[in-house]
Amino acid sequence: MLGTGTPIPLIERGGPAVAITVGGRAYLVDAGEGSWRASQAATPKYGGRVPELVEKNLDKLFLTHHHIDHISNLAAIIYLPWYLGADRQLDIYGPRNTTKIVNHILDAYQYVIDAGEISGMQYEAPSIAVGHDILKSGPVYQDEQVSVSAFKVLHGNMPNSFAFKFTTADRVIVVSGDKRPTPGFAEWAKGADVLVHEVYTTGGLEKAPARVPKISATYHTSTRQLAEIANEVKPELVVLYHVMNHSGRPQGPVEEIAAAGYKGKVVLAADQDIF
């Protein structure tokens, strides 16, 4: 978990970003604030740097949607590995206009490269990053160790938002991105060993500013709704991230999901957790 936060700035939580690691490679989901530095962290909880997250292995990125908290570190993920000598092309898969966003970032930094301040480095836009627009639900990427499919989800007025399913030889991981309950999602997510899902608590919501309950219900998934989803999907583990905790209790989201009738294992993720 490179970042588990929301748009609200918190020292202990970076912007939304997840790394799926398999076969010595990393497959990133979203590029929230601080995700580049998080990928390079010493991971003190686990005694050392995750080898899959060295610069040369960061060559696949999947964007759930284009809200700024999910893509604010995109330029860093594109450029800084290259700046440090990684010889790789970053392929970025995301909703319609992903290619446009990537090309605008490349254009914005072209003048820095043209200045010739980095001795010996050559720059051609396609060799650094290429955007790939996802236009509908279905398979979006496959190599010898992972297959990735996308499922269109509902998220406020965002016209294109996706969840991703990563299928490997030994595990299936689903990352929800930001979404409210979406018809067909639970059926699509069935078979997941790990369900990484956003959530908001309903306890304490009545004390929030008037616009917060409306935003929560229109854009996101409540603890009760997630309990229903998890009971259909039946994963081995539910990992909560992008949590809007209105309850005032540190484990409020986990407690509310259990009270809503889900008895499976639920973990409230922290940055740099590994599952």
Image (cartoon, rainbow, N blue to C red):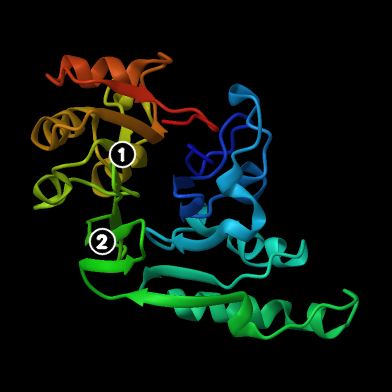
Of residues 202 and 206, the one nearer the viewer is 202
Percent across and percent down for residue 70 are 48, 54
Question: Which of pointers 1 and 2 lies earlier in the amino acid sequence?
Answer: 2
**Residue at figure coordinates x 66%, y 83% from the top left:** 107
Given the image, on which type of amino acid does mark 1 rest?
Answer: His
Q: Which residue is mark 1?
A: 197
Mark nearest the camera among 1 and 2 is 2
| Left or right of 261 in this view: 130 | right
Of residues 79 and 177, the one nearer the viewer is 79
Percent across and percent down for residue 200 are 32, 32
Q: Residues within 10 Å of mark 1 (few under 14, many from 20)?
A: many
Q: Which residue is mark 2?
A: 149
Vertical order, 253 against 25 (above or below):
above
Q: How many marks?
A: 2
* Cβ–Cβ under 8 Å for marks 1 and 2: no
**Residue at figure coordinates x 63%, y 60% from the top left:** 56
| Left or right of 214 in this view: 131 | right
Q: Quadrant of residue 41?
A: top right
Per the image, label 2 sits on a secondary structure element best described as strand
Whether residue 254 can be seen here: yes
